[in-house]
Amino acid sequence: MKSPKSIALCLPFVLSACWVAAAPGQALPPQEAPKGLKPERIEGSKFKLGELFFDSKSGEIWFTCKVNQREADVPLEYAISEETRGKLHEALVSTTVSPFQIQVAMSLLSKHWQASSRDLFREFDDDGMPVGVLKDDGKGRMTILLRKGEEGEAVPLGDWVLDRRNGEPLGA
């Protein structure tokens, strides 16, 4: 099956991030499940869920994205942002695929990944110094690849992000 045109984001394991944000003091309403959204078999182990595609055999998820950040010296907060509810000015690429659709696909692909129980945020003491070390249990890891068009080479998302200190791509 050919991937959709534009930039294809391929997640061969798990995407465990939500990129929805609200203004300070403002909570976003819960996202409602789209009516009639259900997986459709394309061929073999490949399925379509709205604008998201996944392969139940390989555990891959892919969907189209648009380059959102074209300037070289802009700090990024997010790799991917949803176009309608995300923080586009701080994201490298944007997509129309919702976090809800990704979560459904991940649930259907649960045999390919294990959720991590690692700590995501550091704790700090009263003086602002980090306390302890973040625990990494090795679970919930993912590889995010970007590909330009249908025939482009798939490269790690980090190859599209430059390290400000040395001007080199971050890599995988």
Image (cartoon, rainbow, N blue to C red):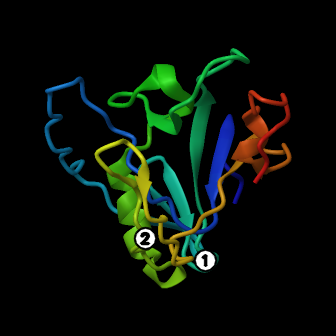
Q: Residues within 10 Å of mark 2 (few under 14, many from 20)?
A: few
Q: Residue at x 54, y 64 (%)?
A: 54
Query: Residue 162's quadrant in the figure?
Result: top right
Q: Position of residue 92 (x, y in %)?
A: 60, 30
Classify mark 1: residues with Cα within 10 Å, few (<14), some (14-19) or many (20+): few
In the rendering, which numbered label is found on residue 150?
Answer: none
For this rendering, which residue is in front, 2 or 96?
96
Q: Check disc 1 and give the amino acid type.
A: Gly
Q: Earlier in the sequence, mark 1 or mark 2?
A: 1
Q: Is residue 81 left or right of residue 27?
A: right
Residue 45 on image: x %, y %? 58, 76
Q: Residue at x 78, y 29 (%)?
A: 165
In this orientation, which residue lies closer to the viewer: 39 or 74?
Answer: 74
> Is residue 39 among the parts visible in the rendering?
no
Q: For the residue marked with disc 2, what is the amino acid?
A: Arg
Vertical arrangement, residue 46 with respect to residue 76, above or below: below
| CB atoms of marks 1 and 2 within 8 Å | no
Position of 22 compared to 152: left or right? left
Q: Which mark is residue 118?
A: 2
SS label for mark 2: loop
Quadrant of residue 71 within the rendered picture: top right
Vertical order, 44 against 160 (above or below): below
Q: Horizontal and vertical percent for residue 147?
A: 75, 44
**Residue 127 in view (yes/no):** yes
Where 20 sits versus 71, above or below? below
Residue annotated with mark 1: 44
Residue 130 spot, x, y in % from top left: 43, 52
Q: Quadrant of the C terminus?
A: bottom right
Task: Residue at 49% x, 65% y: name it.
Answer: 133
Residue 119, located in which quarter of the rendered image?
Answer: bottom left
The local secondary structure at tag 1 comes to loop
